[in-house]
Image: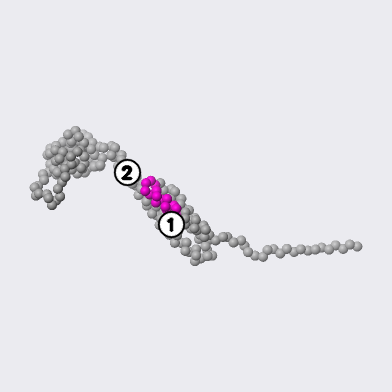
Amino acid sequence: MLVQRRNSESNQTSVQVPTIKVRVKYGSTYHEVCINSIASFGELKKMLAEHTGLHHQDQKLIYKKKERDSKLYLDVAGVKNGSKMVLVEDIASRERRCLEMIQNAKIEKASKSLSQIRLQVDKLADQVTVLEASASRGERITDNLIGMLMTELVKLDEIAIEGDLKLQKRMQKHQVQSKQRNLTEQRPVQQQPTGHSPSVVVTTKWETFD
C-alpha cells in the first residue's frame, strides 16, 4: 500500500489546493461530498459520518473495487473530481467498538468504586486514634470499625474487574484485611465481673445423747 508523505507547513508552497466533489453510494442513497483533493480517506469518512450517521470507524470505503485504508490520501489513490465510491458498514469493526465501549465503561465503574472504597478505608483508619484516646469506649468503637471494614471487603468482592485493576483490587483487599486484623488484636479483652465470692457459712449442729 502506498502512503504519501506530506511536507510540513514550512515547506508547503503557496499553490492553492483544489476542492473536489466525490459521489458516494451508501445503500440506495447517493451523497455528494466536497473535500480537499489531498485529504485522506479517513477525513472523508468523518465527513460521511455527518451525512449518513454511520460512525467513521464502522465505515469501509470502496474505490475502484478496492477497500481503501483511512490513512491513504485521495490524490494518491487517484481520486478526482466526480469520482464515485461505495460506502459499506463494517459490522466486525462496529462489534469490536461496541465491546470496547462496554469494557471501558466497566473499567471506569470499577475504578471509581475502588477509589471510593480507598477513601472510606482511609477515613476508618483515622478513627483508630480515637481508640487510644477513649479507653472506656474502645471496645464499642473497635467493633464498629471492624464491622465497617467488613462492609468494605464485601463491596470489594462484589466488584467485577478484569485487567490491570485486578492488582489494585487485590492490594486494596489486603490493606483492608490488614487493618481489620490489627483492630481485632487491639480489641480489649472483656473483663469478667469482679467482686467478692459469695461467703460460705458452715454450721455445725450438735446432737445431745442421753
From the image, tell me which residue sits under label 1: 121
Of pointers 1 and 2, the one earlier in the residue sequence: 2
Say if 132 sits above or below 173 in the image.
below
From the image, tell me which residue sits under label 2: 100
Q: Which residue is drawn at 12% across and 37% down?
A: 82
Q: Residue furthest left?
A: 15
Q: Which residue is drawn at 62% across and 62% down?
A: 193
On the image, the x and y values in percent for residue 15 come to 8, 47
* Residue type indicated by callout 1: Val
Say if 194 sits above or below 21 in the image.
below
On the image, the x and y values in percent for residue 100 come to 32, 43
On the image, the x and y values in percent for residue 183 come to 50, 58
Q: In this view, does 24 lie to the left or right of 134?
A: left
Q: Which residue is drawn at 21% across and 36% down?
A: 67
Mark 1 Cα within 10 Å, few/some/many (few <14, many 20+)? many
Picture quadrant where residue 205 is located: bottom right
Give the spatial CA distance, label 1 vs label 2.
31 Å
Q: Residue furthest right?
A: 210
Mark 2 Cα within 10 Å, few/some/many (few <14, many 20+)? few
Q: The magenta stretch spans which residues?
A: 161-176
* Residue type indicated by callout 2: Glu
